[in-house]
C-alpha cells in the first residue's frame, strides 16, 4: 500500500474512548478504533499511540478540588495506563490479532514494559503497535506534550491528533455558524492567531522539531486511513 507516512504517532484523547458516555470507556468505541488502527498496521505503517486520560481523571480538576497538583497529575497518568491497556486488549482480540506493546513512563512491569526508546523503535520496526502509557511520567505535563516528545524521540513523520472536531477553525464552530475551517496552517500562523491545536508546550515541541500535526475527526469511519494516505482531511499544521 502506497501510504504517505510510514511511521505515525496517533494521539487519542481519553474522551475519544468515551463515546456518548460522560465518563469512562465505551468498549464498542474502543473496538472501532482498534479496527481502524489494525487496518493501517496491516498495511505496514508503523503505529505508535499516545492515549490521554481525561475520560477518567485530569490532574488540573483534582487540583481545583483541593488536591496536591503533582499527586493529581500522577493519578491522571495512571488513568492513561488503564486506557492504554484497554486499547491493547481490543487490538489483541482482533482476528487476526495486532500484537501490541504498552510501554509506560512510570514503571509497572507487571502490566506493561517500561518505556525504553530504542526498544520502542525496535517493536515498531517489527510491525507491533506500540502504546505509550503514563504520559511523560512527569506531573504538570499533558499527553499532547507526551505525543510531541515521543514523536520526536522515535522520529515519527507526523502526529495525528484525532479528536471530536474535524479540524481547526478561526472561531468556535459551535457558537459561530460562519466559523471557517483551515485546511492547512503553518506553525507561526497558529501562534500569531492564538489558535488551539495543542497546549503551547506540546505545540512548541512540534514546531522546534518540525513535526507536522494533522487534526481530524476520529468519529468519521476511515479517517485514520485517509490521514495515512495524506488525503486532505481536517487541518494540516506544518512548517
Ligand atoms: N498527565 C501528566 N503528565 C503527563 C501526561 C498526563 O501529569 O505527561 C496527567 C495530567 O493530570 C492530565 C492527565 O494525566 O490531566 C490525563 O492526560 P490528558 O489531560 O493529557 O488527557 P486527554 O485530555 O488527552 O484525555
Image: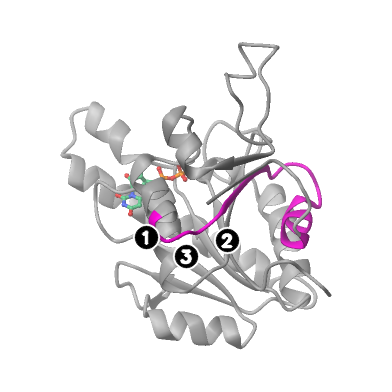
What residue is disc 3 on? 151
Residue 145: assigned label = none
- Front residue of this view, candidates 151 and 83: 151
- Front residue of this view, candidates 52 and 188: 188
Q: CA distance from mark 3 to mark 2?
A: 7 Å
Q: In percent of the image, x 42 and y 35: which residue is there? A: 191
Q: In percent of the image, x 78 and y 55: which residue is there? A: 226
Q: Which residues are magenta?
A: 208-229
First in sequence, mark 3 or 1: give its number.
Answer: 1
Q: CA distance from mark 2 to mark 1?
A: 21 Å
- Is the Cβ of the residue at disc 3 closer than 8 Å to that at disc 2? yes
Q: CA distance from mark 3 to mark 1?
A: 15 Å
- Front residue of this view, candidates 64 and 219: 219
What residue is disc 2 on? 158
Secondary structure category for the residue under label 3: helix
What residue is disc 1 on? 134
Residue 208 located left or right of residue 177: left
Instruction: Give the crowd class for mark 3: few <14, some 14-19, many >=20 residues within 10 Å.
Output: many
Q: Is mark 1 within 8 Å of ligand 1?
A: yes
Judged by depth in the image, the label closer to the viewer, 3 or 1, is 3
Amino acid at each position: 500500500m502506497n501510504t504517505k507516512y510510514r511511521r505515525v504517532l496517533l494521539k487519542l484523547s481519553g474522551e475519544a474512548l468515551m463515546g456518548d458516555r460522560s465518563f469512562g470507556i465505551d468498549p464498542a468505541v474502543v473496538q472501532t478504533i482498534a479496527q481502524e488502527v489494525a487496518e493501517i498496521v496491516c498495511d505496514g505503517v508503523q503505529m505508535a499511540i499516545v492515549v490521554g486520560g481525561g475520560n477518567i481523571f485530569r490532574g488540573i480538576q483534582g487540583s481545583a478540588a483541593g488536591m496536591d497538583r503533582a499527586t493529581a497529575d500522577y493519578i491522571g497518568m495512571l488513568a492513561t495506563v488503564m486506557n492504554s491497556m484497554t486499547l491493547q486488549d481490543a487490538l489483541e482480540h482482533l482476528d487476526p490479532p495486532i500484537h501490541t506493546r504498552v510501554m509506560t513512563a512510570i514503571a509497572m512491569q507487571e502490566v506493561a514494559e517500561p518505556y525504553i526508546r530504542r526498544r520502542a523503535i525496535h517493536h515498531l520496526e517489527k510491525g507491533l503497535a506500540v502504546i505509550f502509557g503514563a504520559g511523560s511520567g512527569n506531573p504538570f505535563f499533558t499527553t499532547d506534550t507526551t505525543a510531541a516528545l515521543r514523536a520526536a524521540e522515535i522520529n515519527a513523520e507526523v502526529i495525528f491528533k484525532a479528536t471530536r472536531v474535524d479540524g481547526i477553525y478561526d472561531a468556535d464552530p459551535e457558537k459561530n455558524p460562519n466559523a471557517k475551517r483551515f485546511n492547512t496552517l503553518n506553525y507561526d500562523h497558529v501562534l500569531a492567531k492564538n489558535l488551539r491545536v495543542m497546549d503551547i508546550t506540546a505545540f512548541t515541541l512540534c514546531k522546534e522539531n518540525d513535526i507536522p500535526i494533522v487534526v481530524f475527526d476520529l468519529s468519521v469511519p476511515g479517517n485514520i486511513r485517509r490521514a495515512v494516505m495524506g488525503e486532505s482531511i481536517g487541518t494540516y499544521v506544518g512548517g
